[in-house]
Image (tube, rainbow, N blue to C red):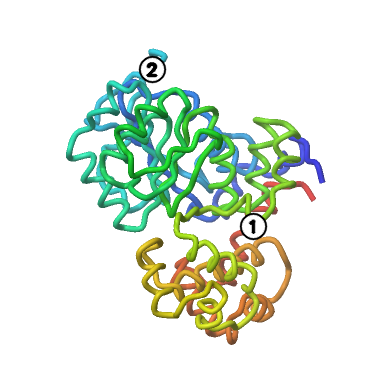
Amino acid sequence: MDRKIEDFETPDVDDTDTERLPNKPDLRVGFILMNHFTLVPVAGLVDSLRFAADKSFRSRQIFCQWDWMTCDDKPVVASCGMPILPTKPLGDLEAYDYIVLAGGLLDETRHPPDWLLDTLRKVHAMGKPIVALCSSSFVLGKAGLLDGRRCAVHFTIRDEFTTRFPQATAVVDQSYVDDDGIITCPGGTAIDLAASMIRRHCGDIRAQKGLVYLLEDTALKHASQETPADSEPHVYQNEMVRKAIGFMRQNLDVATTLKEVADHVGTSPRQLQRAFLSNTNDAPANYWRKLRLEHARKKLANTSLSVTSIAVECGFSDASHFILWFRKQYGETPASYRKRRHEVERLLVVT
């Protein structure tokens, strides 16, 4: 169903409702702005977060939060000449769900400081997704984080990029690529990328809210036409791993064994284990469980099914088993997550 801007407004809710809103944001993003960064992708990404962050259009950081940081904690100047002040010192990055590195002019990103490369390696080792906007893919390449990965780059810098980083696969026909938590966006508005991030953490309603406002109905129609393969967040070079993940996604509601997965891709469980550890830094059993949990979280947010029914439909042996792993993965129970999500939707949409 197409939505209009008015569908997301809640004029009858006053500021006193803020006391009842969840104090834990669904999505936290830390921006590291390099000097002479490109403004447009940063603006598109943060404006999408802004629309998803509040119950109406008041631009308050309630459900999404973000901070501006720079490499030396001093103001930077965008490539267009606009000066930007940091809002927080560059320090503890573990608190964020994503770290966004914003680059621009190549003079700044060709030769990044060693401490920044070390910082990005540590962020990746934490399992924290890193988003590289514009030419900051050069920084990730210099840090070795793009070796063996696909990377979305602007067509004007593809030749230099492939020369400098031959172990990475440059892609010039996609608005962004997420290869196992290393996310590259060549520029543009970055709104597609933002919508994907918001949809994953905040649900469809708030992702659509920004799309409607920023891109009108065309973006919503495009989003509704996506296939599961189109919305797959991670891309892996290993064919065995790709096939195994596809099989896992097709059997999220079935208690299939890892041996059956291995048989499907024509290998042994031991070889499958090695391939997953090498390509995803995770064991296949853990990876599959995370897929099931993410599938369950979407059902909690978007359906009225009971927790027990969702547990069964997502391949868990019982509700207790499901609740245990959900709490470990997301830091709250399925019931508390659903309550918080439904409160968000109630405040965002006029029913």
The relative height of residue 169 versus residue 242 in the rendered view (above or below) is above
Q: Report the residue at 61% width, 51% height from top.
A: 231
Percent coordinates x, y for residue 40 in the rendering = 49, 24
Q: Where is mark 1, residue-wise?
A: 343
In the current view of this chain or complex, which residue is farthest to the right?
Answer: 1
How crowded is the residue under tag 2: few (<14 C-alpha within 10 Å), some, or many (20+)? Answer: some
Q: Could you say whether the residue bearing mark 1 is in a helix, strand or loop?
A: helix
Mark found first going from the N terminus, 2 or 1: 2
Q: Report the residue at 54% width, 66% height from top.
A: 245
In the current view of this chain or complex, which residue is farthest to the left?
Answer: 114
Percent coordinates x, y for residue 80 in the rendering = 42, 14
| Residue 292 visible to an observer of this rendering | yes
The relative height of residue 61 versus residue 23 in the rendered view (above or below) is above
Q: How many marks?
A: 2
Q: Where is mark 2, residue-wise?
A: 79
Q: Which mark is residue 181?
A: none
Percent coordinates x, y for residue 223 in the rendering = 69, 44
Q: Report the residue at 66% width, 56% height from top.
A: 228
